[in-house]
Amino acid sequence: MDLGNINPVLLVASLMISATPILLAAIGEMVVEKSGVLNLGVEGMMITGAVIGFIVAINTGSPLLGFVIAAVAGAALSLSFGVLTQIFLSNQVATGLGLTLVGLGLSSLLGKPYEGQKTATLPKLDIPILGDLPVVGRMLFSHDIMVYVSLCLILAVWAFLKFTRAGLILRAVGESHDSAHALGYKVVRVRLLAIMFGGACAGLGGAYLSLVRVPQWTEGMTAGAGWIALAIVVFASWRAGRVLIGAYLFGGISVLQLNLQAAGMTWGVQYLSMSPYLITILVLVFISSNRSRSSHDAPANLGQTFHATR
Amino acid sequence: MIRLEKRPQPSRAWTVATPILAVILTMIFGGIMFSLIGTSPFEAIRTIFWDPLFHPQFAAFSRPQLLVKAGPLILIAIGLSIGFRAGIWNIGAEGQYIIGAICGAAAGLALYPMESALILPLMIVAGALGGWAWAMIPALLKVRFGTNEILVSLMLVYVAENLLASVSSGILRNPEGMGFPGSRNLSQWSSSQNLELIPNTGMHLGVLTAFIAVILAYVLLTRHIQGYNIRLTGEAPRAAKFAGVSPARTILFCLGTAGVLAGMAGLFEVTGPAGQVSIDFGSGYGFTAIIVAFLGRLHPVGILLAGLLMALTYIGGELAQLMLGVPGASIQLFQGMLLFFLLGVDVLTNYRVRFGASEVA
Amino acid sequence: MIRRTLLATAAAGLTLAFGAPAIAQDTTKACFVYVGPIGDGGWTYQHHQGALALKEEYGDKVEIAYQESVPEGADAERVITQMALSGCNIIFTTSFGYMDPTNNVAAKFPDVKFEHATGYKREHPNVSTYNARFYEGRAVVGHIAGKMTQTNKIGYIGSFPIPEVIMGINSYYHHAKLANPEVELVVTWAYTWFDPAKEADAARAMLDQGVDVITAHTDSTAPLAEIAKEGGSAWGFGQASDMAAFTTNDDGTPGPRIASIIDEWSPYYIKRVGALMDGTYEQIDSWAGMPEGEVVIGTMNDAIPDDVKAEAQAMIDAITAGEYHPFTGPMNKQDGSAWLAEGETADDGTLLGMDFYVEGITGDIPN
């Protein structure tokens, strides 16, 4: 084994790319969960975003437009979940699983004619000065625009939840929908908006897979990324900054284990692959045993159905 | 303005009518989908819902296969529904199912090639214990630390899948398997095989156990104090506490039951229809069972019917692919639609739709 | 054993009930069970191409039916049985995991022919097995890789450490080494047959460590797309299917896919169904390769210098003519112990159960 072969600069650069789809999906899901809704259909929304983004990019030649429409498609699909759970008051867990089925089926039907095609992908940005810096230039400032969009989104969500009135309402709705309702907030409307935001982010994440990460469309190409996004939200204990850490950790471990293999390590690969999930469980235990410190983080009404009786 | 008013009691008429309504809606929208992809909608719907039961060529085979396919779904869903009733959301049955299969198979394979009638019972116990132990992780964490069981049980699914990949190419790998991953075939070793008890009925031990579980769950929920406590905990947690129901005991009981049943389901699959522990063993039954539990309205008899309906769409979907050449994805979408409609129309069971101005927006 | 008796009764009952699908046979019905979607661009796609070629060859005399994404395990046996019931005369089950289900169903339908790809169990007279000598293709691309690498580091993305893949690694490395004694091989295991993002990550990890020629033993085109990002300083090969989309870049320069190993199943499917129709069908264990046209090297693009192309073509011709076996001694095992003496060729049994690397490969086979 020769660890000297692993170049840390390239490792970080490649993990940023590798983590972007799950980062996008996770930050969206975090907002959804903050509003008290558990949407297990991330995988279905991601793959719908992947196929729609790809189709649009092929037909218009513009990957950026692909991302925009993918976000719209993700939001539209998530709206079906929103209507069922918020208006028809169906169970969120079962509806989320159904959303995954619908997304997987729909995407492969839509994508059939596009299999095996190549699309234009996003160029790497040429950032003056920063991009020319030694080490960090290659590591952090030589990516495509969506990498920076995803980072900005983290910042935006953090600021939104922390500083804005709307963010406060969103958290209040997730914390106690009955109290929020009593205060006159429109619980259902807030949740529907959050769900659509989550869908749009998942759509972007999926489009990043099909337009940048592996520029192609193949049935089932998300291969479980949506489920990892769900794990990241928990790992992050519903904090935007930690979603970033979580996504880079999950993405990083996958990239790292492949790099270790390429450098000659042959044992323990599966154990390394399952470690992020075990770490997530430990984090969960830790935050729940420290109720006093983190009680604000986990939305108290997560996954519960809300019906205004009056 | 349309608004919903909660019924004091779920409507009996709608309880029966909503599934029928949902199936009709699915047929309409699914039919539109099939005609869009160029298949005759009537033929497609007939193939999915009618042929597995009555087609002269297939029915004799597929009727019992409905039981084989539905068995594990029903068994797992029964366990889950008990927890769901109490407001305990175990969504990690897939993990408990996998671990049950691994533990049961390991217990049996440790004795290979011994021949004894005691091996299969031993494996069943080991499988049940494995599923139970895997479910106890979220249960104990919830009792001790208040950790969210939805998330822990989901995380443990991924851990279980990684373990499955590890053991099927590692310690449980068939030494005579030419180096391919996957264990010995347990359905071909007479000590461990779980085959049809009565030929051409589909009735293997797992199906039998599923039926027994339906009956026991029914008795538990309607006749037993523990069942009453569970329902009370779900509907009015505070009242349950005042009535002296221990939340910790309820959590341990519900998750434990779900784990035992899921573990047994895994064991019955691995010794019967699946035959071996392999990387692809976990085929999503644990998640599909969640759907089945909700389709069955968390009621044992409902789950029995929902499991059979789900199995029907699987087998009918396969026939539609084979006979009509429709893509597999359209069947997936069709199942998704069915689920959405079933969940959506259920609102009519518990709520009354009122037209008119509402007092609150 | 009571249960055994029950089993026998059950089998007999099934045979009685549906033993002979009583349908008038004007056409021969060939059915295919696929492990992935037909649009996977790799393994299943190629089998489906073979099925379509079969239809093309015989026209109205043959009817084909298939089912995609059939999970290996409990569902497979039911799917295969339904095919037999639907009147299929011959059923091709195209993944290793269908081995036991195929044999189980074959016992119940003695009049239906079963063909299982990549397995080794033929428990009933109506079960044949077939596979292709992909290591012949690996030898050719190994030679090209050895000649093309500038960094002297070549890579191999493995799926699972099974004999099939180890055989491919050894053949690839051995011929790269013969072409370029300085060459060093890097192996990464993806532990999946299909996960585009992970396959891309694996390619990226190797590229970052200075590997500049990569072959994949997984199904998607993701590694090629990743190699394309190097902009002409690294190369790869199409795997299973031609992956022709990567042969030429949009600006007309040679793309990252410099050649490919194509699984060409159509000769076998045409031959077997033809034999069934004219009554010459027999149970076989087929392991064919370049001579039979089942392993094909796709067009070499212009990134490969002409002399290397000529050498590669010479190797293809020699293998096709049966003059050259890619595992010809002298070859040693990884630990230095002798395996094949000068001029000795490997026997099929050793290859099919291959669980060792050849001399020169570093690292261990994971278990």
Image (tube, coloured by chain):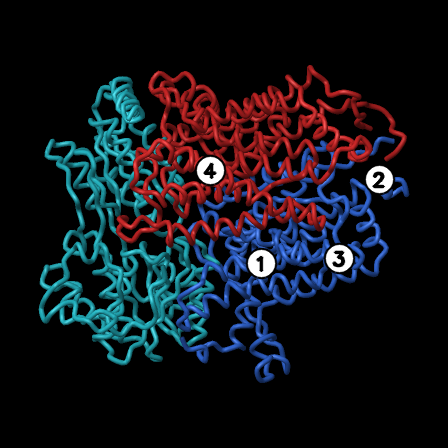
Chain colours: A blue, B red, C cyan
Q: Nearer the viewer, residue A295 or C32?
A: A295
Q: Is residue B180 visible?
A: yes
Q: Nearer the viewer, residue C64 or A172?
A: A172
**In this picture, is C219 found above or below B78?**
below
Image quarter where the N terminus of chain C lies is top left
Q: Position of residue C283 (x, y in %)?
A: 15, 38
Residue at 47%, 28% (x, y): give it: B71
Lateral position of residue A285 relative to residue C16, left or right: right
Image quarter where the C terminus of chain C lies is bottom left
Amino acid under disc 4: Gly
Task: Name the residue that disc number 3 marks.
Answer: A290
Q: Position of residue C328 (x, y in %)?
A: 14, 67
Q: Nearer the viewer, residue C81 or A51?
A: C81
Question: Does label 1 or label 3 sit earlier along the sequence?
Answer: 1
Question: Does label 1 or label 2 sit earlier along the sequence?
Answer: 1
Disc 3 + disc 4, Cβ < 8 Å: no
Q: Nearer the viewer, mark 4 or mark 2?
A: 4
**In this picture, is B254 found above or below A125?**
above
Q: Chain of mark 4?
A: B
Task: Name the residue that disc number 2 marks.
Answer: A178
Q: Nearer the viewer, mark 1 or mark 4?
A: 4
Task: Name the residue that disc number 4 marks.
Answer: B266
Lateral position of residue A131 relative to residue B11, left or right: left
Regarding mark 3 in the picture, which secondary structure is present there?
A: loop
